[in-house]
Amino acid sequence: MNSLRSRIARISLNVFAGLGLVYLFTPIFFIVLFSFNKPKGNYNIVWQEFTFDNWLDPFSQSSLTAALWTSLRISAAATLISTIFGSLIALALSRRAFKGSSVINLLLVLPLTTPEIVLGSSLATLFLNQTFVDFGSITVMIAHVMFQVSFVALTVRARIRGFDWTLEQAAADLGAKPWRTFRYVTFPLILPGVLAASLLAFALSIDDFIITFFNSGSTVTFPLQIYGAARVRIPPQINVLASMVLFFSVALLVLGTLSGQRSEAVKALKRSKDK
């Protein structure tokens, strides 16, 4: 009887997990599907006819293409800055406890729990009070860095939570200077966490709408362009460009996973040879 109950519970859990995945991935499926649609009219929301024409000229909509490149530039710059600052914060908080560390931990969580509309409007008010700041790409990048740092710091900190700091001490005992120790010992070990954090930060940045809306000025990012175009026209190129970003993200994820598996296999092979 107990085995039957456990089997039913296991099957039920798998079914609910599968339904949850279907719920999450259905919108993504329709985005890719409607990139192959040939709509009759201005709105690509009803399936009409299958075609490859949209993919043959994905950059035919110049405004969409320009907005996408703007988003990519802002997201890349913001991700680079936030990855550096967030990783350094994670290292500082993980190495040792110090006065004010609890306050820093609280400040890291605040951007994650604060509604985006509050963050966006607060930053807009801050920029409006600065006469030397003009709304545009710089303000958007600053706003993105603000919430990206929290995600990066928490992700990297989770990665290095079990880090063996005696490895640094061993390197120092062998005569390695702090920078050399960080470059050849610490950084390679925390690199998977740093890459995962940077990918997460990049995805959050390129996808952000609310905070960007309040601080963009005349700068138009890809989400803002879609929002503006949806009121008069939804061309299939929106789905095509979104699908391209999706495929690129998945490719990066697959490459990162394969690289991690390969490095683990190499380490296991070395350990077996050492034995």
Image: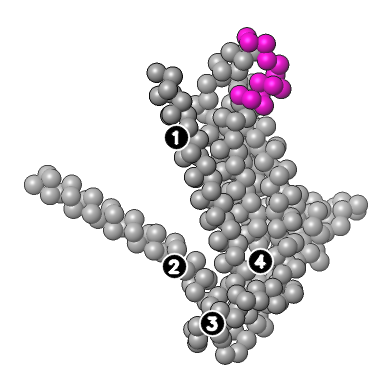
Residue extending furthest bottom?
A: 40
Segment tinted magenta in the rendering: 173-185
Residue occupied by mark 2: 26
Q: Circle 1 sits in a helix, a strand or a loop, which is it?
A: helix
Q: Circle 2 sits in a helix, a strand or a loop, which is it?
A: helix
Considering only order in the chain, which callout, 2 or 1, is on the residue closer to the N terminus? 2
Measure the C-alpha gap from mark 1 to mark 3.
Answer: 43 Å
Classify mark 3: residues with Cα within 10 Å, few (<14), some (14-19) or many (20+).
Answer: some
Q: Residue at x 13, y 45 (%)?
A: 3
- Pinpoint residue 1: horizontal percent, then vertical percent: 8, 47
Residue 193 lies in quadrant: top right
- Tell me: 157 left or right of 89: left
Residue extending furthest right?
A: 132
Q: Residue at x 48, y 39 (%)?
A: 262
Residue 12 lies in quadrant: bottom left
Residue occupied by mark 1: 265
Looking at the image, residue 222 lies above or below residue 187: below
Q: Which mark is residue 51?
A: 3
Q: Amino acid at mark 2?
A: Thr
Are the residues at dot 4 and dot 1 in contact (C-beta closer than 8 Å)?
no
Residue occupied by mark 4: 223
Classify mark 1: residues with Cα within 10 Å, few (<14), some (14-19) or many (20+).
Answer: few
Measure the C-alpha gap from mark 4 to mark 1.
Answer: 40 Å
Classify mark 4: residues with Cα within 10 Å, few (<14), some (14-19) or many (20+).
Answer: many
Classify mark 2: residues with Cα within 10 Å, few (<14), some (14-19) or many (20+).
Answer: few
Residue extending furthest front?
A: 273
Q: Residue at x 57, y 67 (%)?
A: 243
Q: Dividing the image into 4 quarters, which one contains the C terminus?
A: top left
